[in-house]
Amino acid sequence: MNIVFLDGASLPSAMPRPTFANSWTVRERTGPDEVVAALADAQVAITNKVKLGRVQLEQLPGLKLICVAATGYDCIDIAACRDLGVTVCNAPAYSAVSVAEAVVASLFALRRRLFEYREAASRHWPTSNHFCVHATPILDIRGATLGIVGRGDIGSRVARLASALEMKVIFAEHRGAATVRDGYVSFEDMLQQSDAITLHCPLTAQTQHLIGAPQLAQMKPGALLINTLHPIFLTPR
């Protein structure tokens, strides 16, 4: 079996060679125009961020499996893989704990203005006549409303952590949904009620450009938007 890792340098440590691999190639990176040549003799491709589209896949009749070394698989043309009989797998929930904790860390850093006060303390505290620094207002975590888009493993973990901090947690229904399920609020109500919003849904045609100027305009002044997913979720300027 010939296995090719298209962007091995995207991982923090080297991936060990599978014992069943007859040929094992780890490329640091692979450009769009190099994909077909890199996978010409491969039965298995591993990719983190390198895209594999229909045009490329149709030139790779020997390819049988694509392993995405991440949870999101939007870099793969799933419809083309289905048509061509190529199996696709990903690494679900591998970073669920880390992402959930990163959301909570962002809440503390942004609502409590940690970066601003670190700067203010180093610049102004030593020269303060009353040994105090009053910079931008500090906002508490407790009692704030956290809107969560996506109720999978990561979204649920974020909800548990936020609830432990005595935040009010609300889950958003799908944007444009005709009905609102129990345990959810409408997408628009979530935008209007939340002091912070965090995104944990897969990138699909329905979620692409999920947040743009109209949605930002519905949010509270000073509300936070935490995007641990992908820049495509945000509508470009």
Image (cartoon, rainbow, N blue to C red):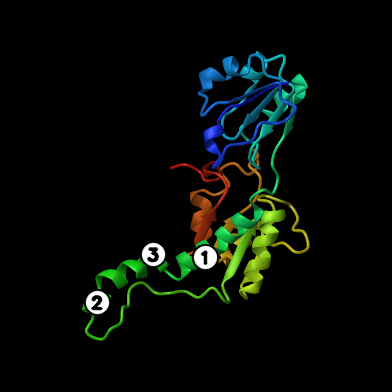
Q: Amino acid at mark 1?
A: Leu
Q: Secondary structure at mark 1?
A: helix
Horizontally, residue 127 falls left or right of residue 217, namely left
Residue at the (65%, 40%) spot, across then down: 204
Task: Name the amino acid, label 3.
Answer: Phe
Please name the residue shown 23% across and 80% down the image: 128
Name the residue: 52% across, 65% down. 107
- Name the front one of labels 2 and 1: 2
Q: Earlier in the sequence, mark 3 or mark 1?
A: 1
At label 3, counting other C-alpha atoms closer than 10 Å, the crowd grade (few under 14, some 14-19, many 20 or more) is few
Q: Nearer the viewer, residue 125 or 42?
A: 42
Q: Are there few (<14), some (14-19), or many (20+) residues within 10 Å of tag 2?
A: few
Mark-to-mark CA distance, 2 and 1? 28 Å
Q: Which residue is mark 1?
A: 107
Give the image location of residue 15, x and y in percent.
Answer: 62, 36
For label 2, the residue is: 126
Horizontally, residue 135 falls left or right of residue 41, namely left
Q: Residue 55: x and y, percent?
A: 62, 17
Mark drawn on residue 115? 3
Q: Residue furthest front?
A: 19
